[in-house]
Image (tube, rainbow, N blue to C red):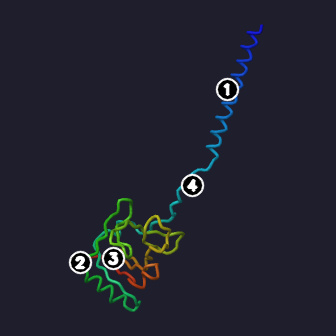
Amino acid sequence: MFAGSKSHVGATRRAGLLGVAITGLALTLAGCASGPTEPPPPARPQFTSPIPPDRLVGRWGLAAYHRPDDATRTENQARAQCSNPYVITAGTNGGVMMYLADDNKLTEVVSKQVAGGPTYIGPPDDPAGGERDRQVVRFDGNVLVLKWLDPEVARRYGTMVYVRCS
């Protein structure tokens, strides 16, 4: 009888240890699921692209002005620059390749607009109207006028006038 009791006690002990192990594993897994996690990546800004990239791709004469009175004269100067055009090419992610202020490498940019507001051209991961954007002052397919939003950049570079080269 003593031998049988010992076997029964051992089985009970093993069952109890198994229950403790399963409970511990369940709590550990629950702790992993509810513990600190990495934050989700920031949401990409939501905007529409009112100017399709293919309307910007091409060769453009480029000039700039600081005073609005010089806009017409500057447009003619930009047209004269077609002998040494500024070339806008298609980007790999649906935008176009242009230079940002004070950057000597091309960056992919897109046209962007939020809820019927102004149209901007700038990096796709920046919110519409961000400091690296340019506001579209005018675009008719042949003339593109862009104003830098960063006041310090605008002071140095002025309002950019692009005239499509034929």
Q: Which residue is mark 1?
A: 18
Dot 4 or dot 3: first in sequence order is: 4
Tell me the distance, in whole angstroms, between the alpha carbons under discs 2 and 4: 48 Å
Q: Which residue is drawn at the image coordinates 33% and 72% (left, top)?
A: 104
Tell me the distance, in whole angstroms, between the alpha carbons under discs 1 and 2: 80 Å
Q: Which residue is mark 3?
A: 142
Q: Which residue is mark 2?
A: 84
Q: Which of pointers 1 and 3 indicates the residue nearer the eye?
A: 1
The image shows residue 59, relative to residue 157, as above or below, that is: above
The image shows residue 135, relative to residue 125, as above or below, that is: below
44, 74: nearer the viewer: 44
Dot 2 or dot 4: first in sequence order is: 4
Residue 55 in percent (x, y) is at 35, 69
Extreme residue in the right direction: 1
Quarter location, residue 20: top right
* Quarter of the image that includes the N terminus: top right
Dot 1 or dot 4: first in sequence order is: 1
Residue 74 in percent (x, y) is at 33, 87
All told, the count of numbered labels is: 4
User: Dot 2: what SS?
Assistant: loop
User: Dot 4: what SS?
Assistant: loop
Tell me the distance, in whole angstroms, between the alpha carbons under discs 3 and 2: 17 Å
The 10 Å Cα crowd at callout 1, few under 14, some 14 to 19, many 20 or more, is: few
User: Dot 3: what SS?
Assistant: loop
